[in-house]
Amino acid sequence: MRTETLIFGPPGCGKTYTLINLIRDELANGTPPDRIGFVSFSKKSIEEARTRAGSELGLTGKDLPWFRTLHSIGHRWLGLNHEDIMSYNDFQNLGRDLGMVFDPNTAKVFEDGLVPLSNKEGNKYLEIIARSAMRCVTLEDEFNDRADYSLYWENLKHINRAYTAYKTNNMRHDYTDMVTKFVSQGTAPTLDVLIVDEAQDLTPLQWQQVSVLKQHAARVYYAGDDDQCIHRWNGVEVSHFMNACDVRRILDQSYRVPKEVFKLANQIVKRIHYRQDKQWRPMEREGAIHWHSNWFDVDIDKGSWTIMGRTNLIATKVANQLREDGHLFRMYDKLSFNEDLIYAMAIWQRLSDGESIGFEDAKYLYRQVPKQGPRAVVKRGSIKTFDAVDPQSVFTYEQLVRDHGLIAAKTADGRDVCNVSKDDRLYMSAIKRRGDFKPRITVSTIHRMKGGEDDNIMLLTESCYPAVNNPNQDDEHRVFYTGITRTKHNLHIVDSECKYRYVI
């Protein structure tokens, strides 16, 4: 007989720790690791679970074949290969067939199941097609719900037919197809334990996949937090999570949120109408909340910071200002200055100083520098000269000139060698003047920061028209509750007098 348990994990209450301990108990009771499934829509969640299982339980990826995203479960169970999945080139080909431009970098639905937003017309149509499948609604209903008057119903039908035909004729699948076909097939790996993490953010289609998975599992655990269900725009309905089963467990001690932040978070969460009531405790430390009318007033020159905005546009505005002020920062896991250029310039500096560099560093440098035109640093095709070289070799500047087509002068400025743009040079100079060469600052949207934390959080209340005018304000309460509870010590709230903002 199958048992099912719903685990509510308020912010910082050790949800992952609890799930890893659950796995530890299962192993102690004789459950084989390959009969434990740990699934989520989020790649980040799966990677964290694998890492913790490795460090705390001594298990490898091979030991845990069913620690996967829901899309990856479909990919493996259906026996698909990498070349079976819609690729960069496939979307380019589709665009040429349709006479329509897609953004190849964001055209597909990524493995975490979130449809990336893009202003490209082709991407907007693909987004509707993918989201209709994830929401389990008709294409027409999704089109009408979107209410984007720049798009046309006849165009959508035409693109959908062409997209479907392209995948059929070329035997390709997108990520939504993996889940759809898994559901229709109705079979799944036989498991003793199935853990569904971040379950509050599953789409209706993903819940159908979970329904298939659980039919082949003895013990099922759904873990998440309804108060942090912030992906309704992607078709997520919190009711699926809330009604998953009757047996409920609430984790009641936060290991992140300090007392003062907890008080404010409680005020926000009480605005949510449809939720599971939860009694949980903050950390013993007091923490602090600071209010500002402008984020320029906040001293961010010391410590670890995350600056969060409601939308990508707001986050980008912050990033542009930080760059202008000479701050080094990370945004969406990328350094604000090209890390490849930084490393390449460091390699060149070693050559200029008369040092030798290794095989991999030499090839790395050659990949980054200009190879044609007046700014050429190496002769075109020179990187192929390394093919016949022992990978254990080391090279001086003189050897690279003699044998591998290096033509730049030894005294050349690294910025010239790596063809650093004028804007990047100005930014580098600003960073040097500030003298802070470690990226202590992260810029993010609230959605991307979910599951993360930082010592100092700066939360901008600026929002946008669709959010402020959303008839279901539970969505916005959940978003800002999630943002507030990322705080470990200090919360700085920037409550500017902008036209559209969330009133905390």
Image: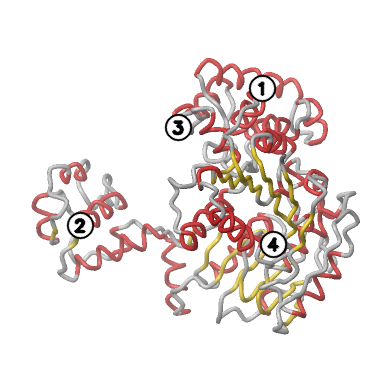
- Residue 155 in percent (x, y) is at 70, 22
Of the residues shown, which amino acid type is indicated by label 4?
Gly
Q: CA distance from mark 2 to mark 3?
A: 40 Å
Dot 4: what SS?
Answer: strand
Viewer-nearest residue: 30 or 329: 30
- Counting residues from the start of the chain, the first of labels 2 and 3 encountered is 3
Q: CA distance from mark 4 to mark 1?
A: 34 Å
Q: Write down the residue under mark 3.
A: 82
Q: Write down the residue under mark 1.
A: 160
Dot 3: what SS?
Answer: helix
Q: CA distance from mark 1 to mark 3?
A: 23 Å
Viewer-nearest residue: 13 or 125: 13
Q: Residue at x 60, y 43 (%)?
A: 192
Location of residue 454 by image quarter: bottom right
Q: For mark 2, does the 10 Å Cα neighbourhood hold few (<14), some (14 to 19), or many (20 or more) residues?
A: some
Q: Residue at x 49, y 46 (%)?
A: 64
Task: List the single residue furthest toward the front.
Answer: 29
Of the residues shown, which amino acid type is indicated by label 3?
His
- Residue 36 in percent (x, y) is at 56, 46
Dot 1: what SS?
Answer: helix
- Counting residues from the start of the chain, the first of labels 2 and 1 encountered is 1
- Residue 45 in percent (x, y) is at 59, 53
- Side (left or right) of 446 relative to 30: right
Q: Write down the residue under mark 4.
A: 309
Q: Write down the residue under mark 2.
A: 408
- Counting residues from the start of the chain, the first of labels 4 and 2 encountered is 4
